Amino acid sequence: MPIFSLVVRLHLRDLARFALLLVLLAAAPTWARPVIYVQPLQPAPDAQALAGVVAGLRAFYPVEVKVLAAVPLPKPAWYPPRQRWRAEKLLDFLSDRMPADGAKVLGLTAADISTTNGTIRDWGVLGLGTLDGKSCVISTFRTTRGVSLSVARQRLAKVAVHEVGHTFDLAHCPSRGCLMEDAMGKVATCDREDDLCPRCRKALAAKGVVVPERVAKPWPSPGAALPK
Ligand SMILES: [Zn+2]
Ligand SMILES: [Zn+2]
C-alpha cells in the first residue's frame, strides 16, 4: 500500500515537526532572558524578605530569577577583628559557585558584611556589587534600623536592584531618588529611592538591558511609607 504508507510517513514527519516546535517554544524564554541566581547565605533573611528581593529584580530587569538552596557563609570571608564577613570575599565565593547557565548571582544574608572604603579598612555595608561583573551580595543587617519589618524588606529589595545595577555596569548616580544613589553610609537614603532615573535607564538600554517604562515596584511610592 504505497499511498497509505506515504500518508503515515507524512503524518509522522508533521508530528515530529510539531513536537520540535513545542520544545523550542518551551525553551524560548530561557534563551531570551539571562538568569540571575539568588543565593541565600546562612544566617539568611526570612522568606518574605527573599520574596521582596526576587520581586524587585523581576520588576526592573529582563531576567529570569532563580533561588538556590541556602548555604552557610564561607569561613574564609570571616573577619575576626570586627566579627563580621568581608563582602569582596563573598563575591569571589558566589562567582565560583554560580551555576553554568547563570549570568549573575546575588548573595543574600542576614549577617553583617563589610569591605574596605577608601582609607577605612573595614566599613560595614548594605551590599557590594562588582561593576560589570557577575556577583553581588546584600545584607539585611543594616536595613532594619528604626523601621518596621515591611519597610526593612522594601529597603532590602531596593538594595538588590542597586547592587545588580552595579553588575550591569551602572556606577553611582547623582540623581536624588534614583535607586543607584550612593547611600553614603546611611540606610535611610533607601527610603527616598523609588526608581531608576532616565540616565541610568539609558545606560542600561545601551547594554541591552531594557527596564520597563512602568515598573511594578514591590514598594510604595516615596512619602507613603517613610520611616519616622
Ligand atoms: Zn552602590
Ligand atoms: Zn540614576
Image (tube, grey):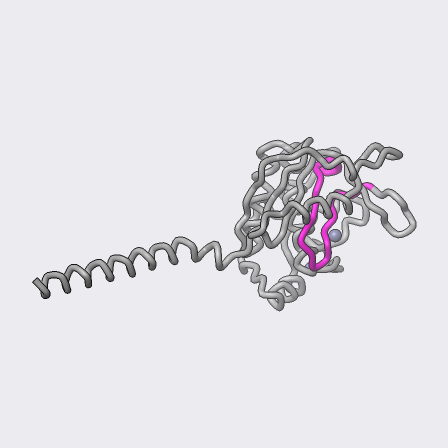
- 104 lies above or below 169: above
Asked whether residue 114 is drawn in magenta, I would say: no
- 87 lies above or below 201: above
Indicate left or right for 178 with 18 as reference. Answer: right
Task: Estimate the x, y position of residue 89 in percent, counting from the top left.
Answer: 77, 44
Task: Estimate the x, y position of residue 91 in percent, counting from the top left.
Answer: 72, 47
| Residue shown at the point (29%, 61%) measured from the top left | 17
Does residue 222 appear in the picture of this structure? no
Q: Who is closer to the viewer here, 100 or 177? A: 100
Does residue 211 appear in the picture of this structure? yes
Q: Quadrant of residue 110?
A: top right
Indicate left or right for 113 with 47 as reference. Answer: right
| Residue shown at the point (57%, 53%) measured from the top left | 60
| Residue shown at the point (76%, 53%) measured from the top left | 182
| Residue shown at the point (64%, 40%) measured from the top left | 225
Asked whether residue 133 is drawn in magenta, I would say: yes
Q: Which residues are magenta?
A: 124-143
Residue furthest right as drawn? 119
Image quarter of the N terminus:
bottom left
